[in-house]
Amino acid sequence: MSSIPSRRRVRALVIVAGAIAALVVVVWRMLAPPASPPEYVDPRPDEAADGYASITHSIFIEAAPERVLEWSNDPERRLEDLVRFENFPAVVSTEPLVGEWQPGRREGDRRRVEFADGNYLAEQVLIDSPERFRYMIWGFTSPQRFAVQHGIAEFGYAAENGGTRVTWEYTFLPTAEILRPAVESFLTSTMSPMMRATLAAMRDGVEGAVG
């Protein structure tokens, strides 16, 4: 008689173990990088009227705005050589999807950005002028997609005291208001160090080039 409850417990444990294993597989598949790069052929998301979490950094460069733009827009300068993440997978490559990415004529151009962990995102230029370079990122394949609908960033270039003030703002639209603190934390802990390091690399590169 005592073996019947024991067999029931065993069956219950087997069912629970199977459910846990199935859950692990589902979670793994959700978090794993895609087997092939996304094509990103659908229209980009619409910009929201409000609701973004944002962070802004700036740096002064001892060079005229046209020299800063010339250095930044050098066709030999790759995104993966400039962006400096400290605690996030590095950018390893970009692939143009729409347009030819010609400086000053990139509005509407789109490219795919690949990271070292095998994840991707799409980037599309919104404004490309001597004063502003504004772009949107979306289509995250990393777990970031669960918290962020899309991001919008903008570089601003303004003459200042014989040099140039470069301002860089990054904004993310949370997928739900309850996730705003997590998105703000990501901006502070991950995006902020990257932005400061990238701006410093830009300053050193421009000032080194102009002597």
Image: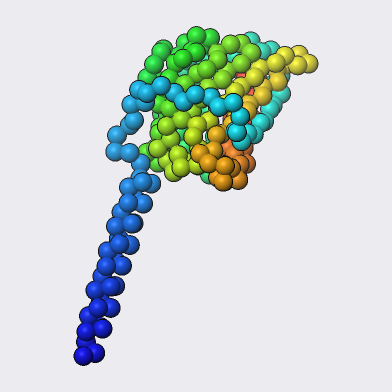
State the image coordinates of residue 99 (x, y, percent, origin top left).
Answer: 41, 13
Q: Is residue 43 left or right of residue 47?
A: left
Coloring applied to the structure: rainbow
* Quadrant, the C terminus: top right
Nearer-the-camera pick, 207 or 14 = 14
Residue 23 placement: quadrant: bottom left
Nearer-the-camera pick, 173 or 78 = 173
In this view, the residue farthest toward the right is: 161
Nearer-the-camera pick, 132 or 193 = 132
Which residue: 60% across, 33% down? 51
State the image coordinates of residue 22 (x, y, percent, origin top left).
Answer: 29, 57
State the image coordinates of residue 105 (x, y, percent, origin top left).
Answer: 50, 9
Query: How many numbered callouts?
Result: 0
Which residue: 49% across, 34% down? 149
* Quadrant, the N terminus: bottom left
Q: Is residue 101 visible?
A: yes
Which residue: 46% across, 14% down? 108
State the image coordinates of residue 122 (x, y, percent, origin top left).
Answer: 43, 27
Q: Is residue 154 left or right of residue 146?
A: right
In this view, 19 is above or below 151:
below
Q: Is residue 19 left or right of residue 205?
A: left
Q: Is residue 70 visible?
A: no
In this view, 147 is above or below 62:
below
Which residue: 54% across, 38% down? 174
